[in-house]
Amino acid sequence: MEFYGYRRKEGRPGIRNHILILPTCACGSESCRIVASQVRGAVNIVFNTGCSDVAANTEMSQKVLTGFALNPNVYGVVIIGLGCETVPHAKLREKIQAKCSKPVVSFGIQKEGGTLKTIAKAVRAAREMAAEAGLQQKEKFPISELLLGIECGGSDATSGIASNPAVGNLSDRLVDLGASAMMSESIEWIGGEHVLARRGATPEIHDQIIQVCEDYEKHLLAAGQDCRAGQPTPGNKAGGLSTIDEKSLGCIRKGGTRPIVEVLEQAQPPTKRGAMVMDTAGYDISSVTSMAAAGCQVIIFTTGRGTPTGNAIVPVLKVTANEHTYSWMEDNMDVDLSGIIRGEQTIEESGGMLLAKLHEITNGKLTKAEAYGFSDIAVDHVCRFV
């Protein structure tokens, strides 16, 4: 199986060829939005932090911003900073340039003399990059070059018994073809972590998965919090999920059954190929953010109750097995798997259908959130306890 993508000098090919307008901090976000609106092929993100933070949170912000720039779907980067943020735009530019050969430029609003002057320079730079990107031709690549992110949100009873198993079948198919699939949301392994850990390719990976869940609970307890107070969410409960254990047993099914070869920290690029898991919070948008920063070219997102979530850099393919949700939120849902619930299609057949849908997305078809220009970003910032 093959797909058409854009060759990168480093790493996997992109399935998109974006010019990313990247803020270093919240103060640069609005200027980035205006620049992106003036350049065809440009996308921007809205970043809500980047300044006045503790060291661990600054490190995470830099990890995510750098990861966005390095994502294979990005051709070039225009950075806009304010000038007094924790990590200035020039330093972020240097971090990115040290890891890739993509075109990267940066501007500081204070240094350039204000918003309008900065926007004018940034628009010119972005247009030049977009013109260069337009010359790049798509090439054929084996499916083994694909890294899929797997996410769920707004789950209900149909998630664990239909859409998640179908995505798990898709994950297995991709891994068998030599591709990679990444599942996140470690808080939603709790109660089922022993089941997930059995998939560890080595005893060390088994123990890592158990340890991730233990550490997460201890971390929250040290802050006087209990993860079971927020899980399942009110929407999960309304959708038929009664306990975190029940939710987790359904959640982990979307990761498939193949051996887990790597346990990753938030926004950490993988070093291996195959099935892997990432230690993130249970907030779906922050998990999608982390997987995009880790280099996923596309993300599949299961939901029972529905969600409009999208990402500026990475297409987000949304799947539901709830017939009402698909018909009621058809503007947001990409795939209807309710035939599983009605007994009209099997998990295996649904996995094959998802593979075909994914193949369309990798070859250029836009997801609904992508066509709308949705860009949801959230960075999980939790101070470290020592």
Image (tube, grey):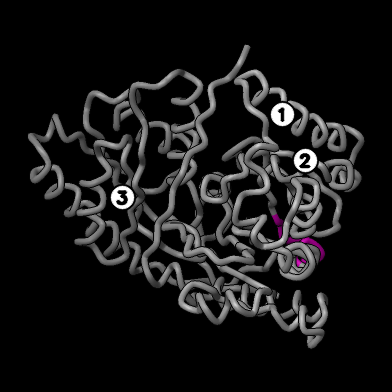
Q: CA distance from mark 2 to mark 3?
A: 37 Å
Relative side of 229 to 122, left or right: right
**What type is the residue that disc 3 sits on?**
Ile
Q: Residue 158's x, y, as percent?
A: 72, 68
Who is closer to the viewer here, 7 or 108? 108
Residue nearest the viewer, comparing 376 with 324: 324
Mark seen at residue 21: 3
Q: Are marks 2 and 1 in contact (CB under 8 Å)?
A: yes
Q: Residues within 10 Å of mark 2 (few under 14, many from 20)?
A: many
In the image, the segment drawn in magenta is 174-181
Earlier residue among tags 2 and 1: 2
Q: Earlier in the sequence, mark 1 or mark 3?
A: 3
Which residue is painted at 33% across and 68% down in the image?
Answer: 134
Residue under label 2: 190
Q: Position of residue 147 (x, y in %)?
A: 64, 57
Task: Classify mark 2: helix, strand or loop.
Answer: loop
Quadrant for residue 140, please give it.
bottom right
Q: Which residue is mark 1?
A: 217
